[in-house]
Amino acid sequence: MATRKKNPLFGAAVLKLSFQLRGDDAGPGFRFVYDGVLRDLGLTDEEVVSYLEENRQAVEAAVRGKVG
């Protein structure tokens, strides 16, 4: 598997979780940015949700700034 920095699923999961933790994941700004990222990376929300479920600890660490 690619490193976290090169894994588009990791990046999309970090984006999604960062909005969720701030409580901003229901707003139009999130949808605009997130949908664009998914489209640009050729991903689906289902893929990101699955990745996030399987890798939540690493994604949370990145969101909290604990990954270099």
Image (spheres, rainbow, N blue to C red):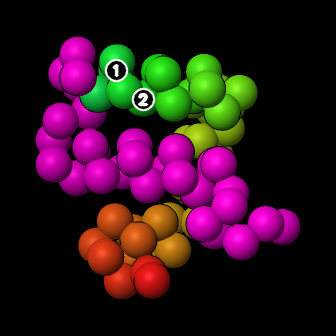
Q: Quadrant of residue 4?
A: bottom right
Badge number at residue 42: none
Q: Which segment is the magenta one?
A: 1-29
Q: Quadrant of residue 54?
A: bottom right
Residue 64 horizontal side relative to residue 47, left or right: left
Q: Main secondary structure of the magenta part?
A: helix
Residue named by callout 2: 34
Residue placed furthest toward the left: 23
Q: Residue at x 42, y 29 (%)?
A: 34
Count of numbered marks: 2
Q: Residue at x 41, y 71 (%)?
A: 62
Q: Inspect the image, locate mark 1, and give the three-letter code of the amino acid beneath it.
A: Arg
> How many other residues sit within 10 Å of disc 2, few (<14), some (14-19) or many (≥20)?
some
- Residue 11 % position (x, y): 53, 53
Q: Is residue 51 visible?
A: no
Instruction: Using the image, determine if residue 16 lies above or below residue 67.
Output: above
- Residue 8 % position (x, y): 65, 49
Residue placed furthest toward the right: 1
Quarter in which the C terminus is drawn: bottom left
Q: Are marks 1 and 2 in contact (CB under 8 Å)?
A: yes
Quarter in which the N terminus is drawn: bottom right
Q: Secondary structure at mark 2?
A: helix
**Residue 5 in magenta?**
yes
- Residue 13 % position (x, y): 50, 50
Residue named by callout 1: 31
Residue 12 horizontal side relative to residue 39, left or right: left
Instruction: Using the image, determine if residue 34 lies above or below residue 15.
Output: above
Instruction: Using the image, determine if residue 48 lies above or below residue 46.
Output: below
Q: Secondary structure at mark 1?
A: helix
Q: Inspect the image, locate mark 2, and give the three-letter code of the amino acid beneath it.
A: Tyr
